Image: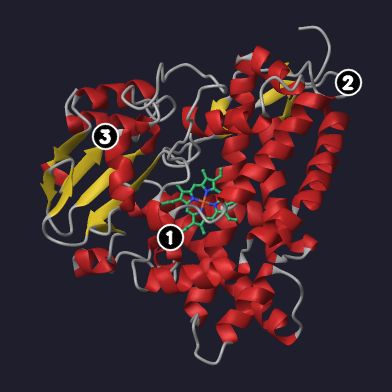
Amino acid sequence: MEPQEILGALMRPPGRDDPYPLYAAARQLGPLFAIPEFNLHVCTGFELINGVLRSPDFGKYEFEYLPQEVIDQYVEGGSVHTISSSILDANPPDHRRVRSLISSAFTPRRIAGLAPAITRVAGELFDEFERLGAQGDPVDFMEYFAFRFPVTVICELLGIPEQDRVRFRPLAHDLTVALELIDDLTKLAPADAAAAELRAYFEKLSEQRRAQPEDDLISALVQVNDADDGRLSDGELIANLTLLLVAGFETTTNLLGNGLELALKHPHVAEGVRKGEIPVAAFVEEVLRFDSPVQLTSRTALTDGAKVGGKEVKRGEQVMLLMGAAHRDPARFTDPDTFDPLRPDNTSLSFGGGIHYCLGQGLARLEAQIAFAQLFERFPEIRLAAEPTRSDRLVLRGYETLEVVLQGAA
Ligand code: HEM
């Protein structure tokens, strides 16, 4: 296949539903290939992607590289502007400054302290899940667990009052469209509306926490925002609160859905986890590798003379990093198309690498380990009730529906 054909097929079903044969075709073109029409290079090799993520010569796309007429198409204060103002899209030195402020509030201690609450939330949601499936009726794991669990946890962490949480799921779901490869900017309308609503919400909530601080992440960030030297601007505060919400939600939802589907396809694995033969952490790592919730990211050459695998990339040119393909790279993983939680040295690029390495990886791993340990223990007979449906996304890969039956004979 030609490079453009592969890229086009990845953006539409059925390629988007099952990108792995397309990644294999892309690997045939080499670990790095160019699509000159789009000023784009595409990376499929694990080592090359790892190298780009860690190289100071590459960074996030700057608006300055775009022609003014393109910039003007994005709604001021909309989804693209909001995400661009967060650390996810920042380059040093701003990235360094803001990331260190956020990490100072987002401490491993705060995360570890959440374990009992996460265990309780998972237990309560599984109680409800069990009630719904008690008569042998099919229950949608995405609807009743995978969506609700991470959104509840991230809202606990941020300090979002319980009555407000119900709005967050559709808002986060709409906003993440801005992280996809968009071929038509009108598709951003729901994402822009969600960004505006979240902005208004976070402005109000941060005012409340400023007046009356609590022991939550929003209060901690508001204090950083108020520090005498104005280290975190108002815009940065709101953009990063929005990022934490969306980054911490849909990705983990997809890890849960992708993991359950793989466990149902490989029943001996769920049984191995239940019997303690397979550590639940190893299961989660293999899900992260085999069917990554984040399939790709991109970087831009920040200087002339930047190189990928010896090939020069001009300043301002983009490199698309296909982590989903890198995770099936036979040069890095033995028998990469086999799902094997006990494979040795199973470090993937699922949480990125370098300075943008996922800030929430500890939380995401903790949530998934707690959820799967409970799930396999409580529902040993769980099985698929219908063919699962994939969500309409390429970058954030997951299921829209995953209906299961909890017990009884097939
Ligand atoms: C960054 C994946 C969960 C917060 C990233 C990046 C990836 C990623 C690949 C780097 C993007 C890039 O380099 O362009 C995931 C996956 C998750 C997950 C697969 C779940 C399975 C979370 C959670 C949170 C979070 C639970 C927060 C509560 C962030 C933040 C960044 C980030 C703030 C930006 C860091 C920076 O740019 O310095 N994540 N993430 N993520 N993630 Fe996650």
The numbered mark at residue 371 is none
Q: Nearer the viewer, residue 379 or 177?
A: 379
Amino acid marked by disc 2: Gln
- At horizontal 34% and vertical 26% (from top left) the residue drawn is 329
Position in image of residue 251 (x %, y %): 55, 44
What's the residue at 40%, 30% (across, down)? Answer: 327
Instruction: Tell me which label, 1 or 2, sits earlier in the chain.
Output: 1
The structure residue drawn at horizontal position 70% and vertical position 17%, both measured from the top left corner, is 272
According to the picture, the residue beneath numbered tag 2 turns out to be 135
Which residue position is annotated with label 1?
Answer: 88
State which quadrant residue 194 falls in.
bottom right
Q: Amino acid at mark 3?
A: Leu
**Residue 306 is at least partly visible in this image:** yes
Residue 220 percent location from the top left of the image: 65, 75
Direction from residue 298 to residue 168 in the image, left or right: right
Give residue 373's quadrant in the image: top right
Callout 1: SS? helix
- Give percent across and percent down for residue 91: 34, 66
Q: Residues within 10 Å of mark 1 (few under 14, many from 20)?
A: many
Q: Which residue is mark 3?
A: 7
Nearer to me, 165 or 323: 323
